[in-house]
Amino acid sequence: MGTDLVIERLYRQVFEDRAVDPEENRELISTLQDLTRIKSGSNVLLTPDKLIWLRAAAFRISGEFLLGDRGENVKLLKAVNAVVRALETTLLLPSLESRGGDEFTTGAAEDLIRSIYGGSDFEEDEEGPVVTTAEAQALKDFLTNSSTRPPLNQLVWLRSTAFRVGSEFLDEGNDKDRNILLLKSINVVVHYIETYCMKPKPLEISLPPTHMPTSDTDLETAVRTLWNLDSNRLEPHKDYKIDVQNSKHPSNKDDSADDPLFTYVNRQVFHRPTYKAFHALLDNYSSYTGEEETVTRKELAEIDAFLNAVMETAPMKYCHQFALAKSAEYKGDPVPEDDKSFKKVLNSIWFELYSRSGGGRHRKMDSSGFEHVFVGEVKNGKISGFHNWIKFYIEERKGAIDYRGYIKPRSKRSSAETNDDDHVLTLQFKWNGVEKFVGSFFIGVSPEFELALYTLAFLTFAGEKENIFVLDTGNESFELDLKCHDYDRGTKVGSCYVEALAHYD
């Protein structure tokens, strides 16, 4: 059973009787802790990155149990509070100093939360939240300002107060729709408390010794493990929807797809830490080679934030362990064992600039591994790189991409049809009028999965002509060739992507 179904079933069991006794609370925490442990061959895994979904799911499912009795609905809010407390205990740590701001008072905090709920007109917009931008900013200012921020010993009280005050605004007529919107408001307030007052617990890999990477671990095993560890991967039909439309030959310049590829992506996904940090990087680059890149302090901070986020995920931790097991080297030295030094390696191979356009002594620092692989470039009138589904979705939503159809794997052994469940797609598209005749990327995977996979490839077998493996995505299998090219005398990522050779049911 997948992670989402396990959690949703657990929540329904808790909310059914609207009470969480000590034994149920211990069972809830024990189950969550068990799901945070990385298991061999298991796709049931929770990480701090998934906290937003976990909390939102608790509020969403609790809405199913709202009744026409105010007293019962107050009990339900207390049960949701207990679930959120269990999530925070399992996945988060306080990030505040023991001493709060000189002007913090419980009364001021309570009044602010009450004004947020009372000021809402309970009109849901496209995004869902019912807390206005001004109210959200006021809450952020209160939580982060050095004079008003809460002390460490008030965090539990503050979150509980979000629920207690919320119960005051339960609709007197027990209008279920209005009470559901109230639940969403409480969720937003709790989200801000967790975002600005707490931090993720460090993730520790505890794979059984038989499943830890060794010098003999092959590529297919490594990719399968990364796939199982990618708890941040999106689910087709639930988190996103695509319309592959018609196939075409790479040499065919006709447009075989009238509509966009992506018909829906849940925008709440971009609030997840690694997705949010990844998204912030995408507008930092000029797409044309030959144009000098400049890196501002803000952009350096965004790179650092992204690397910090991915370093706390299971795929990147496995990638690090794999490189160590393979005795990988970087610049002639062994890959470092500590996380801080390994993060510096990631920064160097992915984000340090180099020249892709040539120019001898007058060459311009116009490219990087990250820009080429994840953002895409235009060189000599053609698209170069651009192997990331998130960037594709964002550009398509802006109207900058024209999806022109998918390309079937060349192998006659392929038996599966290309459809909207596929996690690997080969396609043709135009980006700002420039064509990519054959491009390929994973669909729905997390930023950390791809960065971990391509880093693993670069550090252990960059430049090898064939790196073929079979990936079972659950419903079907893909025979893939992982291409990895180095650059700048072997010190930087030049390009990384997968080529689909065959596709099986």
Image: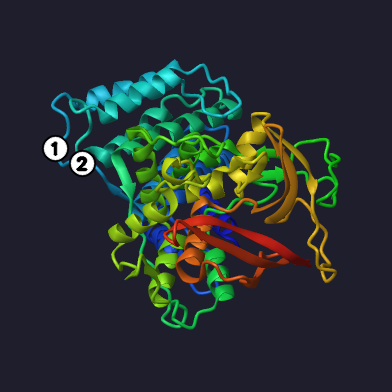
Q: Write down the residue under mark 1.
A: 99
User: Is 495 on the left-hand or right-hand side of 19?
Assistant: right
Instruction: Provide residue 459's location: percent of width, then percent of height.
Output: 45, 67
Instruction: Provide residue 10's location: percent of width, then percent of height.
Output: 52, 56
Which residue corresponds to the image point at 53% horizontal and 20% vertical from the top-left? 122
Exactly how many numbered labels are in the figure? 2
Task: For the N terminus, give its image quadrant.
Answer: bottom right
Q: Quadrant of residue 425?
A: bottom right
The first of marks 2 and 1 along the sequence is 1
Task: For the C terminus, give its image quadrant.
Answer: bottom right
Q: Is residue 482 above or below residue 357?
A: below
Circle 1 sits in a helix, a strand or a loop, which is it?
loop
Q: Is residue 210 above or below residue 183?
A: below
Callout 2 touching callout 1 (CB < 8 Å) = yes
Q: Amino acid at mark 2?
A: Leu
> How many angstroms separate mark 2 from mark 1 (CA)?
7 Å
Which residue corresponds to the image point at 50% horizontal and 28% vertical from the top-left? 182
Instruction: Provide residue 493's location: percent of width, then percent of height.
Output: 48, 56
Q: Amino acid at mark 1?
A: Arg
Q: Is residue 441 above or below residue 377?
A: below
Which residue corresponds to the image point at 43% horizontal and 40% vertical from the top-left? 362
Q: Write down the residue under mark 2.
A: 152
Circle 2 sits in a helix, a strand or a loop, which is it?
helix
Q: Can residue 27 be seen here?
A: no
Comparing 41 with 15, the one in front is 41
